[in-house]
Amino acid sequence: MAHRRLFASWRRRPEKAPSVGLLWVLFAAIMLGLAVLRLPHEMSFGAFIFGDHGGWLTVQALAARGVRPGVDFSYFYGLLPIFVGRLWFGAFGLTPIAFEVASMLCGLMVALAIARFASALRLNAFGMAILVVAAPIAIPSAYYSLAHGIAAALLSNALAGFAQRRRAQALALATAACFAKPEMGYFFGLFILIAIVAAASRRDADGRRGCDWRAVLRDCAPAAVTGALLAPLMAFMYGVPSLLATLLPTGGISNYQALGFGLFNHGGREFYYFPGAPLIAYFALVVPFWFLGGIWLTVAGVFAAARLIGRDPADAGDPRLDAMVAFCAGAHLLAALVMFGGPASWMNYSFVLVMGVAASAAIGDFSFAPVAILVLIAVLSDFGTTVAAVGDWRGTAPAAATAGLWASPAQRADWRTIERLTRGHRTIVISITGAAPILFPGFMPASASFLLPGKRIGDEFAHTRDGIEHAQFVVTPVIGNPGDARHRLPWLRRELASFPVVWRSADLEVRRNPRPLRSAG
């Protein structure tokens, strides 16, 4: 009997909402601890030289040179993060550490959203347990770009504002998110707009349903002002063509299709399919929580939506838990089935999954077993993350040779060799993305942020060919390395096929231009 009373108390929602400030301190501490734990991974040499972290620095550098995002170079997100980055990096420098701190600030904003959410819904012990143990899943130690981080900060706080009945604030934040990463913000905006209209609907004395359109307009006004301010500002800063090219995710859709991205294509399979790995190893990853949590949230969301649809408008009860579960279930399904790209896409909207599962824990006794299982699975994932991070601390270290980034002894030796071979010669670094020319100014400046198949944007390929013809040496990741662009771009493979290899390691190679160099003028 005692254990039943204990479980009943855990399922019961507290009478008084917990303090947002105290909850924020808790979730912020978890996020900052994770950031320190994973510092060698997030500040790794590969992440910036041949990875998306470095690609964001290149985006900032190109935009600062007046090259138009989405028009002159490949860029699949909104203009707001570039504008914020211009202010941030202008103040603190275009460096990896400045990027890491900016990403951490975005994480702190997501932590604040989770604290607001938990307080507004007065989550029970099981809901709070999910938020605590799955916080490393909901708040990544670093985002792949400022676009991902700013979108997560805006949308998570829109979710929290919706939970606090601040629908006008929530819609304004969702509107701003469309200028950061134009995909999920539109869904959030549509759902919140439906909720605003539903809240303004009522029955009159004759039983006829009406709508207080003044209330609707009042709640929509902050979003309209947000859009009316951001659109002309972004157009002024980067031009109307860039604004139009980045307000809809058409470029990203084209490239995702060309890359074979998607949850059930090879891009998604790299997230959850590891041939030869024992089943037990999967539980040290985020994969089981993401799939099982998503399945549970979908089931809970269907029942929550049914209750909302069948609810009597005269009922004075609080429907927010059902609304939040249905909202999060729809958003997670959209992220998984429509917006999933490569293997790291799971983290783009992971806060939606975690917050939705936490809200489901407070709906009825039937939630106890699934949520308790998910708590245990999240703990195993945390253990796996810790083990991997300890390995990074032991196997890598920052060094001046790698621009202060964390690298293994082999990586440091390889880069010293490359610098020695190419010193004093015009050298171009070719990879899918990265920031080698920014961190090592001796290389030729970048002309593209992403070398990917799909929609052709500007003259990136022509500029890359021209750079190769002007270079004496070409540095690339080896064929088969995830950063190598040749397996995606046949023309690049053909272009470099005649360049003899003068040095190669397990990860990198240097090729010499066999043709007479063209004049750079």
Image (cartoon, rainbow, N blue to C red):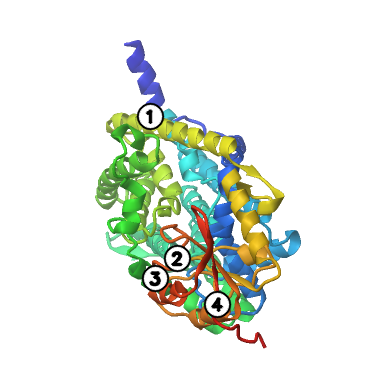
**Mark carried by residue 468:** 4
The label nearer to you, 1 versus 2, is 1
How far is disc 1 from disc 4 in space, using C-alphas?
Answer: 52 Å
Q: Is residue 145 visible?
A: no
Quadrant housing residue 285 = top left
Near mark 2 (Cα within 10 A), the count class, few <14, some 14-19 or many ≥20, is many
- If the image is split into quadrants, where does the N terminus sit? top left
Label 3 belongs to which residue?
A: 255
The label nearer to you, 4 versus 3, is 4
Front residue of 10 and 49: 49
Task: Choose the circle earlier in sequence order: 1 or 4.
Answer: 1
Q: At label 1, which amino acid type do we have?
A: Leu
Residue 371 x, y percent position in the rendering: 34, 33
Task: Choose the circle earlier in sequence order: 1 or 3.
Answer: 3
- If the image is split into quadrants, where does the C terminus sit? bottom right
Q: Label 4 near label 1: C-beta < 8 Å?
A: no
Q: Say what secondary structure mark 2 lies in.
A: helix
The label nearer to you, 3 versus 2, is 3
Left or right side of 104 for 286: left
Label 2 belongs to which residue?
A: 216
Label 1 belongs to which residue?
A: 376
Image label count:
4
How far is disc 2 from disc 4 in space, using C-alphas?
Answer: 57 Å
**Mark carried by residue 116:** none
Q: At label 3, which amino acid type do we have?
A: Asn
